[in-house]
Image: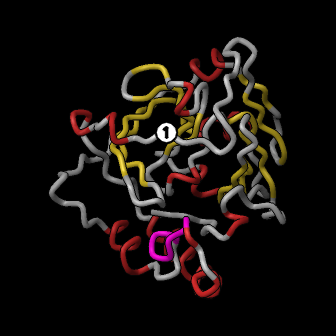
Amino acid sequence: MSPTLNPASLLTRRRLLGLGVSGGSSLLLGGCALNGFSEQVGAATQPLNERLEAWMQGRGPVPEFRRDQVDPEALLVNSFNGTPRLDPVAYRLRVEGLVSRPLALDLKDLAALPQQRVVMRHVCVEGWAAIVAWSGVRLADVLSLAGISPLGGYVEISSADQYFSSWDRASALHPQTLLATAMNGAPLPVANGAPVRLATPIKLGYKLSKWVTRLRVVSSLGVRRGTWEDKGYEWFAGL
């Protein structure tokens, strides 16, 4: 497990990135209230932001919090298109695209893989944050099981509520990126994305899709990049 964070020492390299270095990022431009000026600035600075964020992200694991620092009440519940209720018995996570072994994993299959826990700060672009303990399988392990192709540079994520997002390969394979099935030591609640959601300390909250049903590995980004990304939010959304 990664080193724990002292709550009094929050000005980390990633927080510095969000507060000042990434001048065109969603945190600074207010992704929930984009205007023409911010869109122009974001378009001009985004390539530099993404390269810098990717470099910072590649410097090692994000320090984690202690389990006793979890604040369950701080995690707000939201959804894009209502709250879908998926049948746990019928549920399948499909892994398709540039893989040598397409998968349709049920919850027993996921439970049979090595389980991990990440105690992380969940940061929403709207300005709130919460420390949460997520448990589940590494996304990297699932993609490895599927035999991800060297040509697969991106992963598209589809959800039962029609939410859509896409990630770069390195973020998807990051050791702290989970397909979470539990939260704070209990089964993942429906409102928080059960049976499976994404969780990682390296991305803003709108990249952490809930009710995930399909992963599709692709070689390049398509016209459609994400539900909020297509509305002007930063695509990389790194922390």
Most foreground residue, 26 or 53? 26
Q: Position of residue 78 (x, y in %)?
A: 54, 42
Q: Residue at x 26, y 34 (%)?
A: 67
Mark 1 neighbour density, 10 Å: few (under 14) some (14–19) many (20 or more): few
Q: Is residue 152 left or right of residue 24?
A: right
- The residue positioned farthest toward the left in the image shown: 8
Q: Which residue is mark 1?
A: 77
Q: Is residue 154 left or right of residue 137?
A: right
- Specify the quadrant of the image occupied by residue 221: bottom right
Q: Is residue 131 left or right of residue 209?
A: left
Q: Position of residue 153 (x, y in %)?
A: 73, 59
Q: Quadrant of the C terminus?
A: bottom left
Q: Is residue 1 magenta?
A: no
Q: Position of residue 6 (x, y in %)?
A: 18, 51
Which SS class for mark 1?
loop
Most foreground residue, 65 or 193? 193
Q: Which residues are magenta?
A: 26-32
Q: Main secondary structure of the magenta part?
A: helix
